[in-house]
Amino acid sequence: MLKTPAIVLNVKTYEEAIGKNAVSLAKSMETVANETGVEMAIAVMDTDIFRCVNEVNIPVFAEHIDPIKPGSHTGWTLPNAVKDAGAVGTLINHSEHRLKLADIDACLSFAKDFDLDQIICTNNIKTSMAAAALGPHFVAVEPPELIGGDISVTTVDPGIVSGSVDAVKTINDSVGVLCGAGVKNGKDVQMALELGAQGVLLASGVVKAENKLEVLRDLASGC
Amino acid sequence: MLKTPAIVLNVKTYEEAIGKNAVSLAKSMETVANETGVEMAIAVMDTDIFRCVNEVNIPVFAEHIDPIKPGSHTGWTLPNAVKDAGAVGTLINHSEHRLKLADIDACLSFAKDFDLDQIICTNNIKTSMAAAALGPHFVAVEPPELIGGDISVTTVDPGIVSGSVDAVKTINDSVGVLCGAGVKNGKDVQMALELGAQGVLLASGVVKAENKLEVLRDLASGC
Amino acid sequence: MLKTPAIVLNVKTYEEAIGKNAVSLAKSMETVANETGVEMAIAVMDTDIFRCVNEVNIPVFAEHIDPIKPGSHTGWTLPNAVKDAGAVGTLINHSEHRLKLADIDACLSFAKDFDLDQIICTNNIKTSMAAAALGPHFVAVEPPELIGGDISVTTVDPGIVSGSVDAVKTINDSVGVLCGAGVKNGKDVQMALELGAQGVLLASGVVKAENKLEVLRDLASGC
Amino acid sequence: MLKTPAIVLNVKTYEEAIGKNAVSLAKSMETVANETGVEMAIAVMDTDIFRCVNEVNIPVFAEHIDPIKPGSHTGWTLPNAVKDAGAVGTLINHSEHRLKLADIDACLSFAKDFDLDQIICTNNIKTSMAAAALGPHFVAVEPPELIGGDISVTTVDPGIVSGSVDAVKTINDSVGVLCGAGVKNGKDVQMALELGAQGVLLASGVVKAENKLEVLRDLASGC
């Protein structure tokens, strides 16, 4: 399982993170992880899991799995295949890939069967509690109004982090909370951790940065 | 809100419950409710809510609502319209109409805004806990293996009822549990209540019965 | 089947067209249809089909049907029920309710089984041709960039109408084309008909108008 | 573009075709393609495209693409990434992964932008005509009743093949037809080609065969 505090990067389907660029980004993360000792993981497109796993030594996650067993499911993401390609974890229910409640539960079971770390993404305190009831490793709270924007969650709405941490603990105190939006720099990371989060999940702020090493080092400095 | 213990009938899209047949079925329930004093509610197709509300005096539910506000949503089920047609409650996330977690949460908020009773359907103890965390009036547990079959839940798997009741209470003890599958007769109803349920949600056993009054009276006898 | 030229109004899930307001709107259309002899049809929410059919004498459409037979389909829209409630036709594949290709085909078959008029909505010339290959009564072309806006399709992009008419005819010349967006007034209707359309499908321009009778009379004047 | 006649294998999410087993299967196809000169292509899971492309020299297809551009689409299949990983084509709208009509059209455009061969899967003659109107390289007809079974399409229902070929030609005679179900052996391939198909799309018959080389050689003998 991910060591905490953890910095998890979701490269989505950004043009800057396809193929060799995904590998290059993962290498930058590996560099900073080695320099600082901070746990850094990357979630990449299915097409790039195998490449990243084989060329870089940091935890590689899938961005999604489908709740299916081997069989007739053309074009869906098989948990077995994600594991076989070398992923050690997966995002589940990202805001851009919402799942039915029963399917979140099923994905969680499949992930556990394959010893994949599980990060369930949620959009508010209520759904964070619901996700916590299912028992994943982490819940990543992503308030929709903060995703992709320039706003810092901890400045504008620190209550969403501390409130989620508290609410999640009342349901299941073995579940960690990641701050899933509004994290731009080391100061945001530090604040998220102070508010009780065990890490952060971020995307465009790193993927689209001119100087990725610099941004990653700044983020790591917050841990 | 529904008085408990409650018998809730979901007519799905059965041929036996379209239009005037839905009204007729609702009238049978009204008859037995009046005879026995047992709370009986019916969930009907959108097309039949207005008719049933205007011709029968029992609580009428929608089978589903979509998480939408008035606007550009052609062909979806608007909570405002369900309320306007006279429904007093709604099923949410039925096994035949699963919703994304964030949408269950949104549907619940819309239902509360319109003072509609909320029954969230779930498939196991974990998802019942997750649903309870959202705070509906009721969670109806429907183990998939029992839906539509001839098996009695309380004989085969009483633990799913008592386990759900216990688990739901640990999360939010103001949430009631309905036994949502495997209920065929008054004895099943009685057992479900003894196991801690506050009512039952059933479908084909009534809708497809030759003698509906007889089946309804038997079910009511279990309360 | 609808007489042509036809003016079809889709009330979507607008607040101004719920329940008695849907009935009132349908009555305004009936008034203008009677005054002018122009065919006017209204597509309303499922919850309002029965009321409109029973209180107004113009063709009432469903906004959508699901490709299902009677059975276990909680909360979905059953073609049989739409027919039973009195609808004489249905929109299929509206831009706000897109369907899988195989489901459009299945919906079309169900609609034919129940003698419901079929209007398949499409977004460009290619998909209009594809829809025409399935053999509905009408294809309504709605270029996404024009939906809900203030732009007149016939001014800005008359080619989408004449191009769709021509393309549809090459595939199946028994299929009529409706101009499904960018129609605001009688002049737009007239132009759409001159470009080969057999009618128009519109929404907010009527539903949200202060003086609905005035707008409807103006639209009718274009026929 | 694929040379015809072509034998296209869809490995779905079968356990027998994950990771190194997908590579091994592709190598068997390469062997038989080299022996016989018959065009053989393999559609594999996203996680295995890169591996297969780098270890085997036959055309590798994706099983599916999503109609998206680079950006914020966590966990979906980006056409750019599929191309970058080395795929030369893609299935679209497989029976296990049906798409909305507008999305089939969009996927086709994306595939063309990336010079990916396009095979749109369909379920009957009508939807084959609709797909042909969109202008893909191939339409693969898969009658649902034949998928995964032991029945030979050309014995039981040769009309679905010849009828689809004829119907597709009336719409767009540059579109090829693949026989997408009910093909088990070389004789079936031969019959499919005689009925006008330009190839076959198959799955379990090869993936689950004890002796894959033998089955592949038999299939090739039908060309």
Image: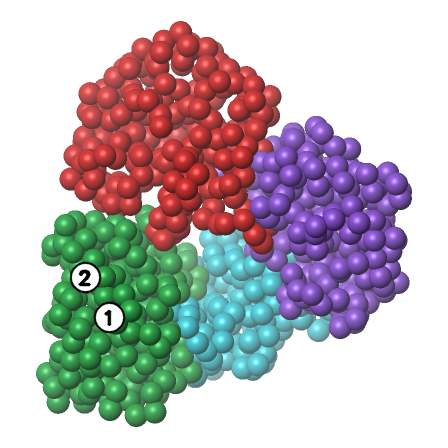
Chain colours: A green, B red, C purple, D cyan
Quarter of the image with the N terminus of chain C is top right
* Same-chain check, marks 1 and 2: yes
Disc 2 is placed on an element classified as: helix
Three-letter code for the amino acid on which mark 2 is drawn = Ser
Cβ–Cβ under 8 Å for marks 1 and 2:
no
Q: Which corner quadrant of the image does residue C3 belong to?
A: top right
Visible in this render: residue B125?
yes
Visible in this render: residue D187?
no
Disc 1 is placed on an element classified as: helix
Q: Chain of mark 2?
A: A
Mark 1 → mark 2, Cα distance in angstroms: 9 Å
Three-letter code for the amino acid on which mark 1 is drawn = Thr
Q: Classify residue B12 as left or right of residue C133.
A: left
**Closer to the camera in the image, A137 or A81:** A137
Residue at 48% x, 68% y is D66
User: Relative to residue A147, is residue A100 depicted above or below?
Assistant: above
User: Relative to residue C110, is residue D30 depicted above or below?
Assistant: below
**Closer to the camera in the image, B136 or D35:** B136
Residue at 54% x, 17% y is B24
**Closer to the camera in the image, D111 or B23:** B23
Q: Which corner quadrant of the image does residue B8 belong to?
A: top left
User: Relative to residue A61, is residue A54 depicted above or below?
Assistant: below
Residue at 78% x, 33% y is C57
In the picture of the structure, the residue carrying the numbered disc 1 is A154
Question: Could you say which disc has been placed on residue A162 in the image?
Answer: 2
User: Relative to residue B197, is residue A71 depicted above or below?
Assistant: below
Q: Earlier in the sequence, mark 1 or mark 2?
A: 1
Residue at 20% x, 58% y is A163
Locate residue B208, reporting x and y percent.
48, 21
Question: Could you say which disc has been placed on residue A183 in the image?
Answer: none
Q: Classify residue D90 as left or right of residue C173.
A: left
